[in-house]
Image (spheres, grey):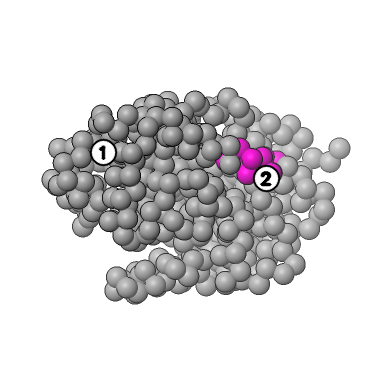
Amino acid sequence: MTMHKILINALGTESSGGISILRKTLQDVSLDEENQYHIFIYTGKYIDSLLIEKNYHNNLHFRIMKNYGLIYRVFFENIFMPFYINKNNISLIYNLTGTSQFFSGIPSIVKIQNLLFFTKGLDMLYFKRNKRLLWLKHIYYKRIVLSLMLRVAKNIEIQSIHVKKELSNFVDLNNKNFFLKNDFSISNDDFSSPKKYDFKSEIIFLYIVGPHFNMPHKNIDDFIRTMVNLLDSGLNFHIKITLTRQQLENSDFWDKKLNKVTSFLGYIDNKKAMQDLFADNVVLISTSVIETIGLHVIEAVLNGILCIVPNESYSAKVYGSRVLTYNLFNSESLMEAIINLKSYNNIKCQGLIIDNQNYIRQNENEKYQNSLSIIKDVLNKGK
């Protein structure tokens, strides 16, 4: 049997969701005793902790680099990588963060896990908030580069079918092979029993977000404004948020009157600590304008808690039609969705959670279950 060398390009992996996906990818390919993997990643706090948290199989070879920005990265991937590919007889490139190489000369897979650059609705959001320069910096320039790269890509991995629709607004998808893949474990052991709810007691609102919380697409405004309104209404609640007090108070969004009802958790990279957040009477709120999959919501549902998400097309595709929703950029709508919970008894809450879990179980089971299966399919086809 032929031994292949595969280059995993994880440059640009920074977000908590991206780290989770990289972790699962490394777990998948470490089980492949037939092939060798060369992994390119940037150094950083979260990457460093990922590398030391377990001893990976000796078929993984890490190439750790400093991050010098997008322009250097494009140069590196298209000038240096082809030399590395030829020198090390690489058979396939697995690009984890949406880039591709123009001159590699070998099959490649491009994984799309960030729709920030391919969502028309975000353009209008930046324009309405008079952030045209930020739009140029955060979206437009990167959209041009990534769109050009996708034009030469033949194999594209996506997490949900709505991603393909968003891409079609900017890239001709004819003659592309799409692989729909699950990025988390969905065995029966991964689904917890629904938590208990009594909305006559204190409600815990959980808001999970990473260090890029101030980006417009995270839309944290909806959450903060709603929490202020709820505080003024006298509702008995507490906030748990995965940011530090300093991060929020240094931002333009936070209202300090919420300090007295908030636990500032900071970034959580411990699985057990994260699972401990999914407890009785906890409601996760997500306000993202767009998600490719929304792992924080998926993990919340798997761990048996209620979620409220934007009433956007991606929500129905990823979480199902029974998930609780509100209208984006409308704090009154979010407040109404929360107040309506007070009419829900425990049985109704648990029924909604079970419906959400059943949808995710069925939806994700229809996808590729690991990176290794896609890699082997592309290698076998040789394209």
Asked if residue 122 lies left or right of residue 255, the reply is: right
Q: Which residues are magenta?
A: 360-372
User: Any magenta on residue 369?
Assistant: yes
| Residue type at numbered disc 1 | Ile
Residue under the point 57% across and 71% down: 169
Residue 68: image quadrant is bottom left
- Mark 2 packing: few (<14 Cα in 10 Å), some, or many (20+)? some
Q: Which mark is residue 239?
A: 1
Residue 156's place in the image compared with 22, above or below, is below
Residue 169's place in the image compared with 116, above or below, is below
Residue 56's place in the image compared with 220, above or below, is above
| Mark positioned earlier in the residue sequence (2 or 1) | 1
- Mark 1 packing: few (<14 Cα in 10 Å), some, or many (20+)? some
Residue under the point 49% across and 25% down: 193
Asked if residue 320 lies left or right of residue 214, the reply is: right
Q: Is residue 116 visible?
A: yes
Residue under the point 43% across and 46% down: 324
Asked if residue 57 lies left or right of residue 297, the reply is: right
Q: Which residue is mark 2?
A: 367
User: Any magenta on residue 81?
Assistant: no
Residue 284: image quadrant is top left
- SS majority, magenta: helix
Element assignment for label 1: strand
Q: Please name whichever residue, 188 or 26, is drawn nearer the observer in this view of the structure.
A: 188
